[in-house]
Image (cartoon, rainbow, N blue to C red):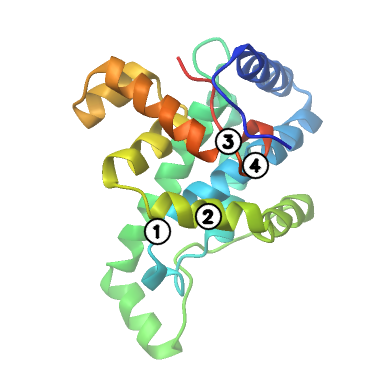
Amino acid sequence: MEVARPDPDAHDERLETQELAARAHAGDSARFGELYERIAPSLYTWAEIRIRPDLRQWIDPGDVVQEVWCRAWKIFGSFDPQVVTFRYWVFRVAKNVLLEAFRKLESPAFKARSRDNGHSRAVELVDVPDSATAITRRVAREESLQLFARWVQSLEQEDRMLLVHLGLEGLSQAEVAERLQIGREAVAKRWQRLMARVAEQKLPREMFAAVQ
């Protein structure tokens, strides 16, 4: 499969995802599983990039992705496909999950338990559907995603954050420009250069958000 690029096909991909999201929100629960499978590679790669290697013994990217699935399903009623894209919404859920895990690592209770047990998880999974576990494990074995995550981590800070915020999380160019304190035109040009550099990598079509 070819990497998604900022072209009309990418726009169509976004509309297709939003249609799935609208149907799931209307009560078609099977569509939520399709949404999860579609977004899982981006979520897993995002977690790989955001979790430092020295924290992996306590926070596993796969655990984060599965917890996002459970959390998103529980609060799916708060998602409004007329207001926000599913990608944008689900990554807000992911940010909360990861922030809570980071905070938990710093808590005295977790530190004491980790000393006593020798190994503890900051993301404790409960009642995760088998389908979500199977999808996450399959994504975790994707060598192309592992190589891509390592490549992203090797980028300069600004390019790395551009790819994370604009490409994976689905923020708009205007939001990213404000967050990184650079012009919107500069964001567009740097994004185009980044896409040219990843065009040869075999990544899922839905890996990146449509760029606005």
Residue at (52, 64) in percent of width and height: 60
Q: CA distance from mark 3 to mark 2?
A: 27 Å
Q: What element does badge 1 sit on?
A: helix
Badge 2: residue crowd in 10 Å (few <14, some 14–19, many ≥20) = many
Q: What residue is shown with label 1?
A: 101
Q: Where is residue 67 shown, x and y percent of the image?
A: 57, 52
**Is 55 left or right of 17, judged from the image as shown?**
left
Q: CA distance from mark 4 to mark 3?
A: 9 Å
Q: Where is residue 161 shown, x and y percent of the image?
A: 34, 40
Q: CA distance from mark 3 to mark 1?
A: 33 Å
Q: CA distance from mark 2 to mark 4?
A: 21 Å
Instruction: Say what amino acid the circle numbered 1 marks.
Output: Ala
**Mark closer to the chain start, 3 or 2:** 2
Q: CA distance from mark 4 to mark 1?
A: 28 Å
Q: Where is residue 81 shown, x and y percent of the image?
A: 58, 15
- Proximity of marks 2 and 1: CB atoms separated by less than 8 Å: yes
Badge 3: residue crowd in 10 Å (few <14, some 14–19, many ≥20) = few
Q: Residue furthest left?
A: 181
Q: What residue is shown with label 2?
A: 64
Report the disc number at residue 186: none
**Mark closer to the chain start, 2 or 4:** 2
Q: What residue is shown with label 3?
A: 199
